[in-house]
Structures are given as C-alpha cells and as structure tokens.
Image: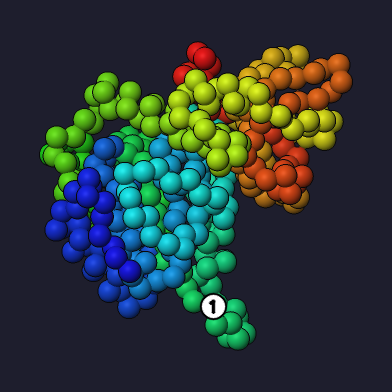
Amino acid sequence: MDSSPSPDIYIPDQWTKAANFILSSSRPPITFICGPANSGKATFSRHLLNVLFTKCNRVAYLDTNVGQPEFTPPGFLSLTILHNLTPDMTIPCLKTPERSLFFGDVSPQRDPSTYIKYIRSIYDYYQKEYRTFDKGGKSSRIQMPLVVNTSGWVKGVGYNMLVNMLKYICPTHVVKIGISTENMNLPAGKFWLGGKHDGTILMEIRAARQDSLNGSGLAQNNARLVRDSRLMAYFRQCLPSDSNVSTIKELAHSLTSHCPYHVPIASVKIRHVHRKVPSSQTFHSLNASIVGLAVESKGPGNLPWCLGLGIVRAIDSVKGILYVITPVPFDSLKKVNLLLQGYIQIPTGLLQV
C-alpha cells in the first residue's frame, strides 16, 4: 500500500522517520501525539495511520480533541476503528466511530474532570475489546495499534490534563511536536513522569510549518470555520448521496425541506450538559438546537454512548412531539432514549439563510 501523503501536504523527513520507527515496533504500538495548537498533530496522526496501514489491516484512533476531531463532528470524544488509508489528507473524512461520548463543547475548559472521565472510559473500552487476550488463552485476537490525538491546550489546566492522560494510557510511544515559539511548547523530556523513568519511547519532532498562527485571531477564526464546515458536512449526510447541493444556501434549503423524524417527548429523557436549565425553559432551549442522540446505559457509573447528532427543527408541545433531523440510521435511532444538549451550535451560515 502506498503511504505517500497528498501532494499539497508537506511531510518533513523527520516525521517520516518517526512514523517508520513506530511501524517497526515489535508489538502493536500505542502512540500518543501531543503539542501546542496548530503544530500539525492531526496531520502527523493521519500520516502515521497511512504508514501503519502498510503493515496493519486495522488501526484504532482515539480522538480527544473535542474542538477539531478528525473523524467526527465537534463535541465528541471517540474511538474509531479504521480499515484503510486516507489518501487525501487535505479532505475532512467523517466516519462512524466504534464508541463515542458527547462532551457537548469545543473545549474541555468547562468541565476537565468529566473530560478525563470520558477519555478513561473510551480507553478502557479499547483495552477490553482490542488489547486484552482471553484469560483461557484460547483467543487468537490480534492486538490492534492505537493512535491517540490530543488538543493543543498544553498550558495550565490543559497541561495537567495531558499529564493525567499520559499516566493513565501509558503509551508505548509519545510523539511531541514543537513549534518555533518555544514558550508555547511542552517541557523537554518525559515531562509527565516527574523525573522518573519508564519504557515509553519519546520522539520530539518539529512542526512542518514554523510560521505557526498560534494564539492569533486568525487561527481562532479558522478553527471556528473548520468546525462549521465539519458540522455542515455531517448534516449533509441526511440528504441522498446524489443530491445536487453545492452551496450553504442549497444545503440550508434542503435541510429545511427534509422530512424530520417524529420523536415522542415521553420516549426520551432530556439532559443539559455543563449547565442547568429550568424545566419551564427546556423546550425553549431545545428548539433549533443541536443535540447528541444517546443511549442511556443501565447500572451505576455507566456512561451514555452517543450515536450521533440531530437538529431539533421544531417542537409541538401540544402533541408532545420533537421534530428531529439526523443522518443516524433508523435502526440505530430506535435505540436512542436520551437527548444531550451542550454548547454545539448550528453553523451561523445555515441560520443566516
């Protein structure tokens, strides 16, 4: 298989050597990628996936970047099992994750403890399903490589969360990407160990672009546009694949005319994430909002796995009906018994139309 990057993507030799070194590992690697915002973590992770696919049939991808996830809409923490190359790394690629939790915000800043709890839950699922042999020794299960992508929040609380994640996951390899603005980088060495030593292999590489836009208004605006674009691509899946929709205006009109699902209010619970809403204002807050479509698990400590997103297009409080637009297949939608509302908003471009 050809792991060559897209023509428009520059992959430094240092990156290629790091990816090939990880590929040569004697056991399926767990690779943790970290660095400041706009350092190229997502691009390196996609490149590493393509290199791993020259040897592996499947690779797991744990995405902890709720602001700009690689394979899901914003607001999710997810584990995706990938089966093939991503040949054009310039094109966003939406995939259905194996497991996902709806965090409901584009930054973990509002609730770091829940963010860490969700990551641990998804990682535990990976360990159970793809890393652990049966105790009887009868299983021929092949351990699956894992790539962990992280956000660019590496200072203050963000740094503490990163250390927490590293200590819990205990990766075989850590790829730390640095930029030219040194005071924005992570500390040198195995910073998460506090001077101790373990068997983790640390690789420190430089960003492909040294003219980073970190912290600038342009970078923040670009991040918002990327999130909006990802959300629009997600809801574009509600329409037939042969639909002639090429502009935001056409997408808005197509979604407006798209037949919604009728969801009896009595059949679902409604939960607001990161905030409290008076019961008298529940319907008002839900109308024209994006919600996570989740399945509430039974038993203490079980978290609600999320199957996707929906737009609450309208509410008929007299009939007790929610009108929801979603690309989630009907067979999966029948399992949904919980709607989660966070801070993920309908893209401004759609609302303006």
Quadrant of the rendered image containing residue 90: top left
Say if 199 sits above or below 304 in the image.
below
Say if 37 sits above or below 250 in the image.
below
Say if 4 sits above or below 210 in the image.
below
Q: Is residue 40 left or right of residue 78?
A: left
Say if 339 sits above or below 56 in the image.
above
Quadrant of the rendered image containing residue 152: top left
Q: Nearer the viewer, residue 150 or 73?
A: 73
On the question of residue 276 being in view, the answer is no
Q: Horizontal and vertical percent for residue 233?
A: 49, 36
Neighbours of disc 1 within 10 Å: few (<14), some (14-19), many (20+): few
**Residue ID for mark 1:** 141
Q: Residue at position x 57%, y 59% from top?
A: 125
Q: Residue at position x 28%, y 37% from top?
A: 37
Q: Residue at position x 19%, y 52% from top?
A: 11
Q: Is residue 122 left or right of residue 50?
A: right
Q: How is the image coloured?
A: rainbow
Q: Amino acid at mark 1?
A: Arg
Q: Residue at position x 86%, y 16% from top?
A: 318
Which residue is the extreme one toward the right? 319
Q: Nearer the viewer, residue 133 or 14?
A: 14
Q: Nearer the viewer, residue 2 or 162?
A: 2
Q: Horizontal and vertical percent for residue 162?
A: 36, 46
Q: Is residue 333 left or right of residue 9?
A: right
Q: Helix, strand or loop at disc 1?
A: loop
Q: Horizontal and vertical percent for residue 323?
A: 73, 26
